Amino acid sequence: MNENWALFKRNLFEFWKAFRRNKLGLLGGFLVLTAILAATFAPLLTPYAPTEVIRDVNGRGLTFAPPSVHAPLGTDDAGRDIWSQLIYGARVSLAVGFLAGFIAMFIGSLFGILAGYFGGRIDNLLMRVTDVLLVIPDLPLMLVLVATLRQMDLHVSPLVVLVFVIGLLYWTSTARLIRSQVLTIKERQYVARSRAIGAGHVHIIRKHILPQIMPLIVANTVLIISTAILIESGLAFLGLGDPTQPSWGAMLNFAFDRSAVTNGAWWFYLPPGFAIVWVTLGCVLLGNVLEDMLNPRLTAHHLESNQNMIAIQKREGE
């Protein structure tokens, strides 16, 4: 146990040494971390509740009030503080994105491992299911599923419906990526030795396959989270979110429904749009850097490219 913990700490330290040299990775981590911290400490960062109406001295709501000392990002058409809605909306958008991303990661990893490890009929069946979902347009299918589930009156929150719909439809790329990696790992000598001494499938997958692909799963999950946040914002903007919960997509929906553009209330629609770009850009930068560092194929390709470049430079120097 102590040896495993020491190995884990050493690997984590080496990873951090390599990661902190990558400026794009640090920028992506900063963007994602600030959004998570803002959502976590929302009550400390906001002077009002997201549904609280800011009133003037006469008791009337300050509708479409521009940014001021009392309302840093102004107010909406009902006199509610935009900054408070933005910070509390981070909780909803991030929660939907992370939960849907983890569901997609779990399903995609499970399909990829089973298809790549067992092959044969299991591989054909799982990959045909994956191909079917890949060729179906995502947005129309999600619109149909969300609208159908909401019509069924299942007595669940629309946000729960969004989480499961996004998670159940965005695992296909993960499944194909994991499958291709498992196909190469299962042919290695240490896997063949374990199989030869009578190790079972569960033992081989748990001890040899999963540890090798886990870094790739982590990197791909970060990218899926960015996609899930974008999809949630798009569906909420179309009116399929929960109108009682302040998410970034719902804020955009309210802004355009209540003529914020024609009224010149830029503070109503620009902040949630900027927040969506902030988080998704951070996830994309962080995910790409993690995949570049942790994907064995990319690492080998970069090492080979660097060796070729060194060889060329040596020949030119001679």
Image (cartoon, grey):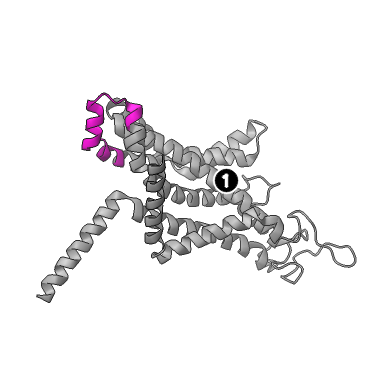
Q: Is residue 132 shown to the viewer in this render?
A: no
Give the percent coordinates (x, y) of residue 121.
29, 25
Q: Residue furthest right?
A: 58
- Please name the predominant secondary structure of the magenta segment in the image: helix
Residue 199 within the segment the image draws in magenta: yes
Pick the residue in front: 238 or 274.
274
**Where is 99 relative to 71, above or below?**
above
Pick the residue in front: 165 or 205.
205
Q: Residue furthest left?
A: 318
* Horizontal arrangement in the rendering, residue 58 relative to residue 75 (left or right): right
The image quadrant where one finds the C terminus is bottom left
Pick the residue in front: 107 or 207.
207
**Where is 207 relative to 267, above or below?**
above
- Disc 1 designates what residue? 96
Give the percent coordinates (x, y) of residue 165.
53, 38
* Horizontal arrangement in the rendering, residue 305 relative to residue 205 (left or right): left
Give the amino acid at mark 1: Val
Give the percent coordinates (x, y) of residue 243.
69, 47
Residue 68 within the segment the image draws in magenta: no
Mark 1 packing: few (<14 Cα in 10 Å), some, or many (20+)?
many
Q: Which residues are magenta?
A: 181-204
Pick the residue in front: 293 or 81.
293
